[in-house]
Image (cartoon, rainbow, N blue to C red):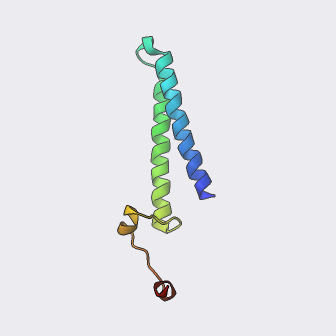
């Protein structure tokens, strides 16, 4: 369920970025487009929301990082896992 939410937020970010590009190209001669600014502001808000959501998920242990993040938050192994 969490993966679906993360992917949905990421797709909304990409859609907002594409919308801003469309309005920027469409209103090229106007100099400033309110729709472009709104789309980019919405994208920034979604990006911050996604970052905070990921931070909370990692801090609570719901998702566990692997790779570089695993060195920052080392995993605790039980005795049965260390025997394997």
64 lies above or below 50: below
Q: Residue at x 64, y 58 (%)?
A: 1
Residue 13: percent from left, percent from top = 52, 40
The residue sitting at the front extreme is 84
Please name the residue shown 48% across and 56% down the image: 54
Classify residue 71 as left or right of residue 9.
left
Q: Going 37% across and 62% down the picture, which residue do you hit?
A: 68
Residue 31 vertical position relative to residue 44 in the rendered view, above or below: above
Q: Report x, y in % for residue 56.
A: 48, 60
Q: Give the residue drawn at x 49%, y 33%.
A: 17
Place of residue 66 in the rendered image (x, y in percent of width and height, measured from the top left): 44, 64
Q: Nearer the viewer, residue 32 or 82?
A: 82
Q: x, y percentage for residue 6?
A: 56, 51
Residue 54 vertical placement versus 35 (above, below): below
Q: Residue furthest top?
A: 29
Viewer can see residue 12: yes
32 vs 83: above or below: above
């Amino acid at each position: 369920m969490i993966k679906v939410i993360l992917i949905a937020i990421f797709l909304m970010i990409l859609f907002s970025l594409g919308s801003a590009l469309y309005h920027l190209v469409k209103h090229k001669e106007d100099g400033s487009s309110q729709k472009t600014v709104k789309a980019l502001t919405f994208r920034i808000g979604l990006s911050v929301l996604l970052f905070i959501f990921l931070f909370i998920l990692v801090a609570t242990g719901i998702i566990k990082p692997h790779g570089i993040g695993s060195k920052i938050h080392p995993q605790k192994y039980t005795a049965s896992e260390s025997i394997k």
